[in-house]
Each structure stands twice: as C-alpha cells, then as structure tokens.
Amino acid sequence: MCLGRPDRPERQILQAPRFAKAKRRLPEQAQLAVDEAVRGILADPLSGVPKVGALKGVRVVKFKVGPQQLLLAYQFDPKRNLMEVLDVGPHENFYRELQ
C-alpha cells in the first residue's frame, strides 16, 4: 500500500512566441527578473491574479524591475500539470494586446 502521494509528472512549461519576443526586447536585468518570476510561478502556479471576461483562465503576476512595473500573463492547466506563459510587458496596452 502506498501512503505517499502518487508520482506526478514534472510540471511542464511552454512559452508562447509573443512571450519569447517580448522577453528578448527587455534589458538584461529585466530578463533576469522575468526568469525569477517564472520560477516563482512554477513553485506556486495559483499565485497570479485570475482574470475574468475575455481573459478568463489567464492569470497575471506583477513585479518590479527598478522603477518600472512589469506584468506576466500565463495559463495553468492542473490536469496536464502544464503552464503556458503568454506575454510579459509594462501595463500600458498589456491587456488589450493580450486579448
């Protein structure tokens, strides 16, 4: 009889082409901060603020790089243990472009 939790497949992460392109455009310091934010999300995928309406199913995490605040949008599928990072960038036009 197994008393521990059943073995789960390792959490997978996918990055949307939009995310990769936006991350490349950021300065190196901001890219490192994005990597750190993604690691934090991998540890606790429900930490982001869930969105409603047209963006239902999307979660957003906010973090600062110096004086600038960046947003990171992602989706998490607990059944497949899969996280997809969708976009990263400043707040200006972020949600409009995400739709």
Image (tube, helix red, strand yellow):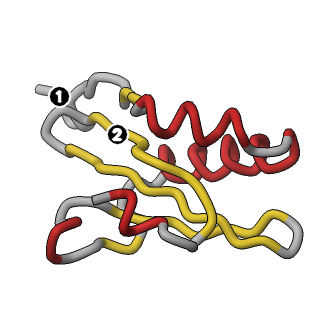
In the picture shown, does residue 43 fall above or below 69?
Answer: above
CB contact under 8 Å: marks 2 and 1:
no
Mark sitting earlier along the chain (2/1):
1
Looking at the image, which residue is at 26% across and 35% down? 81
Q: Quadrant of residue 20?
A: top right
Q: Secondary structure at mark 2?
A: strand
Front position in the image: 38 or 15: 15
Instruction: Characterize the local packing of mark 2: few (<14), some (14-19) or many (20 or more) Cα atoms within 10 angstroms.
Output: many
Residue name at image x 35 percent, y 39 percent: 84
Distance of label 2 from label 1 (alpha carbons): 28 Å
Where does residue 5 sit, x and y in percent of width and height? 24, 37
Task: Indicate the amino acid at tag 1.
Answer: Cys
- Amino acid type, mark 2: Met
**Does residue 61 appear to the left or right of 22 in the view shown?**
left
Residue 24 placement (x, y as % from top left): 69, 33
Q: Quadrant of the C terminus?
A: bottom left
Residue 64 in picture, x, y percent from top left: 75, 69
In this rendering, the answer to whether 59 lies above or below 74 is below
Q: Is residue 99 above or below residue 87?
A: below
Picture residue at 30% right of the left edge, 72% below the top: 50
Q: Is residue 35 above or below residue 13?
A: below
Q: Quick one: 53 or 13, which is closer to the camera?
A: 53
Residue 6 falls in image quadrant: top left
Q: Residue 2, which numbered label? A: 1
Q: Secondary structure at mark 1?
A: loop
Position of the N terminus, as image quadrant, is: top left
Q: Residue at x 18, y 32 (%)?
A: 80
Q: What residue does disc 2 label?
A: 83
